[in-house]
Image (tube, helix red, strand yellow):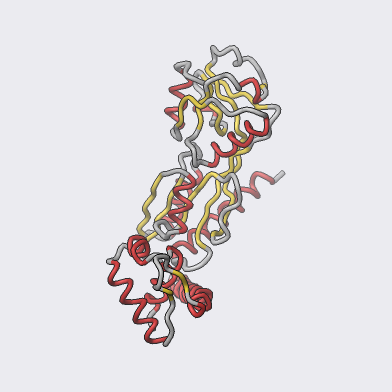
Amino acid sequence: MELRQLEYFLVVADHASFTRAAEALHVAQPWVSAQVRRLERELGHELFDRSSRALKLTEFGKALVPLAEMALQTVGEIRTTADAMAGILCGRLAIGTVAHPLPLLADALAAFHEAHPAVSITLTEARSDQLTAAVLERHLDMAVVGRAAPPPPQLCEQLLAQQNIVAIVHRDDPLAGRASITLTELQNRPLISHPQGSGVRAILDQACLATGFAPRIAFETSSVDMMSHLVTRGLGIAVAPELPRDRLDGLRQIDLSDQVMRGRLALVWRGKVVTPETVAFAAHISEQFRKEANLVGAP
């Protein structure tokens, strides 16, 4: 029995398809099928019921899932311990992120690269729902997402930042002189917001629904620069996490008094079958977040 066979078995079980599992693993489908068949012969039991169009786990397959996950997790921990003892990590780390104006991820990546220069790091930008799916499907090791709800139970989470969601208007807008407004006052105004599938957009849609109306979204963008350009040209009011002061040239941020909305950035990664690099980065960013939180809370 090989660890690779257990990994392939788990990916097929997750996707309920040999074809989708092969795509997720970036290998040929016949190779995945052959490895699973070999595992079945070695164990003396079929793992999947192939008698219908929908691929399903047999009773033995269901029993093997937690054992295989435990075996791979244990091997990962052994490798992590060995790497830690040697002081060297040299694998790959694929990270995804939503667009946001905060430097925290770049700072964490810079510090991690300094500590582990042999690790190859890639960074991908997408929506929160796309990133979460990519982590679950093992296309990414981890991702920074905007969180509107708790992550799926298969994922671990580290909260990184919270920001108030505000209305962002041009300085010549009639609302620019106000310290606060109600969400209802935006009911008939064209709004600029993050795309469907993002955490911020989910929070806005839920708040508007609770207030009794559907938001009139004129433009969708995750780019802070594009959002600022659209507001500056009078094309709408942005409802988004508050911007750093150095990004407010010609813009005003107004609190929403009747709805407490907060954008949350969180790092998510799979709780099982993780790489040593993922474990190391999660521990690294957790420690960094703890230090920053202590500094903020220090008298």
Looking at the image, can residue 118 be seen? no
Tally of numbered discs: 0
- Relative image position of residue 234 (x, y in whole percent): 48, 16
- Relative image position of residue 24 (x, y in whole percent): 36, 61
Residue 261 position (above or below residue 283): above
Identify the image quadrant of residue 2. Answer: bottom left
- Relative image position of residue 176 (x, y in whole percent): 59, 16
Residue at figure coordinates x 70%, y 28% from the top left: 258
Residue 137 position (above or below residue 265): below
Residue at figure coordinates x 52%, y 17% from the top left: 170
- Relative image position of residue 6 (x, y in whole percent): 42, 76
Residue 8 position (above or below residue 119): below
Q: Quadrant of the N terminus?
A: bottom left
Identify the image quadrant of residue 87. Answer: bottom left
Along the horizontal axis of the image, is 209 left or right of 277? right
The residue at the far front in this view is: 52
Q: Quadrant of the C terminus?
A: top right
Q: Nearer the viewer, residue 237 or 211?
A: 211
Looking at the image, can residue 195 be seen? yes
Residue at figure coordinates x 36%, y 76% from the top left: 36
Along the horizontal axis of the image, is 64 left or right of 19? right
Residue 229 position (above or below residue 75): above
